[in-house]
Image (cartoon, rainbow, N blue to C red):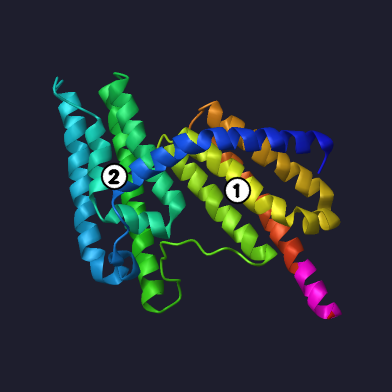
Amino acid sequence: MTTTLKRMSALVFASAMSLAMVSLAMVSSRAMANGEIGDHVNNLHAHISEYTEEVHWLESKFGSVVDAYAAKDKSLKTDALIEYWEEVEFHSAIETQFVPIYASIWQGIYGVKMAIDGGKPLSEVRKEQENLNHALWQALGAVKLAAQYQKKGLVDVVKTTEKEPTTGPEVIDDIKTRLDRVVAKYAEQLHEVATTLVHDTYLQRFEGIEGDLIAKDAALVEDLEKDFNVTLPQAISKNKGVDSVRAVVETMQTKLDRARALLVEAEKSRKDVF
């Protein structure tokens, strides 16, 4: 690691520590709002009809909020959009199965909310509503597919406790999942939580595999260090929108795929030696 980036890492660590207490409270609050992950997430196929009913219900409820805006209802409160989403079991079904689409739903919810709160023309609000509905149905399709794989025993059981990765490739897989969650937390408007997750992922995961990677591609390591410490945190802090943050993450994940291939090669070489 370069001297500059080492210094930057120390600053990042201090920043992450200062954010930890705030983030912990925000995560706890969000977890209580969403409720505990129920057993239904490990038995998806038995609940598809319920999820489908919930998606229809959400589409109706979200529509009623937009209709109230169209009718210039003075009692309209856009926080209802979030409350409706957090009320359904489908919420945790998609969160545990496909985080990128989960983030898209949050993006859609806030798209409608901010358009209404900002007094945008009804046509713009309807467009945001259409995007949100599309994300909901896309999510239901993803859950249905996951249910099929789950029934065949092709996907892991959802666990509430995190399993620590033990090999380099497993660490890369975990980093990519964490980066998906960064996008989701940003979409939920939990920007400090998203930033802290970026810092923690760098310090607790990426730094542990840097040694093996530097021997294979030092330029790639330095590039990813910059992404973790500068590019992604800046994308979050500048608040240019979910698409902007997701674009940074997608670029990082392409680099991480390259890093994973290098670590697979390194492990194979070690096995061949012994």
Residue found at x 36% / y 53%: 138
| Percent coordinates x, y for residue 103 in the rendering | 42, 45
| Horizontal side of residue 63 vs 220, given as left or right | left
**Which residue corresponds to the image point at 36% horizontal and 56% vertical from the top-left?**
94
Magenta segment: does it hold 266?
yes
User: On the image, which quarter does residue 47 sit in?
Assistant: bottom left
Q: Name which residue type carries label 2.
A: Ala
Chain-order first, disc 1 or disc 2: 2
User: Is the residue marked by circle 2 packed among few (<14), some (14-19), or many (20+) residues within 10 Å?
Assistant: few
| Near-viewer residue (223 or 70) | 223
Residue 73 image position (x, y, % from top left): 13, 22
Callout 2 secondary element:
helix
Name the residue nearer the viewer: 6 or 63: 6
Q: Which mark is residue 262?
A: none
As drawn, is 253 to the left or to the right of 79? right
The disc label shown at residue 201, or none: 1
> Which residues fall within the magenta stretch?
265-273
Residue bearing mark 2: 33
Vertical placement of 237 versus 262: above or below?
Answer: above
Q: Is residue 101 above or below residue 241?
A: below
Principal secondary structure, stretch drawn in magenta: helix
What quarter of the picture does the C terminus occupy? bottom right
Res 124 visible: no
Quarter-of-image position of residue 108: top left
Q: Badge 1: how crowded within 10 Å, few (<14), some, or many (20+)?
A: many
- Amino acid tagged 1: Thr
Q: Residue at x 52, y 64 (%)?
A: 163
Q: CA distance from mark 1 to mark 2?
A: 25 Å
